[in-house]
Image (cartoon, helix red, strand yellow):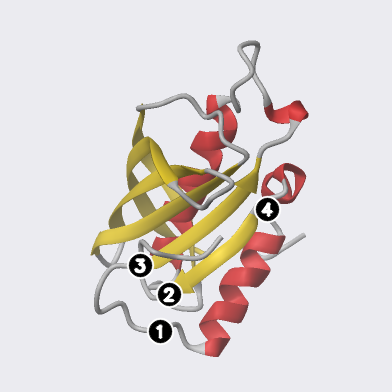
Amino acid sequence: MTSDSLPAAVPELAPEIAARVRANIARQTLLSTLGVTVECLAAGHVELGLASRADLMQQHGFVHAGAITTIADSACGYAAYTLFPEDRDVLTVDFSMNLVAPAMQRAFLAAGSVARSGRTITTCRGEVYGIEPDGQRTLIALIQATLMAVTRMSAS
């Protein structure tokens, strides 16, 4: 999967910030359990991929909304995190998710972008696309998220 949804004029992410974001994503055991991949990291914009699997399906044969919501929330959270100073971490405090089409494709791409970044509160919006084998995208979900910068807790 490649990024077609990168907003215009998004600055590249400094290598040290990209490394910090990737390390933080690697500590998210839910994301690794789901098999989430990092498709794009930019300042204020993150794209995460998810391949469809039988163990992610709900009873109608679609990828479960919980998995789709997880990648949408995480893409927004990490988009916000790319703009935070090194001593800060991110927590979602609110989001609104709209599921607009069944998640029945073989792969998915969640794109999260910062709408407004503040010292403590950041607002993001994002989309999740189902990716067809020929690369065609189908919009399946929309998210708006509010995230909070918190002091980084030491890892135990």
Are the residues tagged 3 and 2 within 8 Å (C-beta)? Answer: yes
Are the residues tagged 3 and 1 within 8 Å (C-beta)? Answer: no
- In-front residue for pair 81/62: 62
x then y, percent, for residue 95: 35, 37
Q: Residue at x 51, y 50 (%)?
A: 109
Q: Nearer the viewer, mark 2 or mark 4?
A: 2
x then y, percent, for residue 71: 53, 45
Give how far apart the Cα atoms at labels 4 and 3 are: 24 Å
Q: What secondary structure is marked by label 3?
A: loop
79 left or right of 123? right
x then y, percent, for residue 23: 67, 70
How busy is the neighbourhood of tag 1: few (under 14 within 10 Å), some, or many (20 plus)? few
Q: Earlier in the sequence, mark 2 or mark 4?
A: 4
Question: Which amino acid lies under the numbered mark 4 shown in the image of this protein?
Answer: Gln
Report if residue 152 is visible in the image: no
Q: Which residue is mark 4?
A: 28
Are the residues tagged 2 and 1 within 8 Å (C-beta)? Answer: yes
**Quadrant of the rendered image containing residue 18:** bottom right
Q: Nearer the viewer, mark 3 or mark 1?
A: 3
Which numbered tag is attached to residue 12? Answer: 1
Q: Earlier in the sequence, mark 3 or mark 2?
A: 3
Give how far apart the Cα atoms at labels 1 and 4 are: 24 Å
**Quadrant of the rendered image containing residue 138:** top left
Give how far apart the Cα atoms at labels 3 and 1 are: 11 Å
Give how far apart the Cα atoms at labels 2 and 4 are: 19 Å
Q: Which residue is mark 3?
A: 6
Q: Which residue is mark 2?
A: 42
Q: Earlier in the sequence, mark 1 or mark 4?
A: 1
Question: Which amino acid lies under the numbered mark 3 shown in the image of this protein?
Answer: Leu
Q: Residue at x 41, y 72 (%)?
A: 84
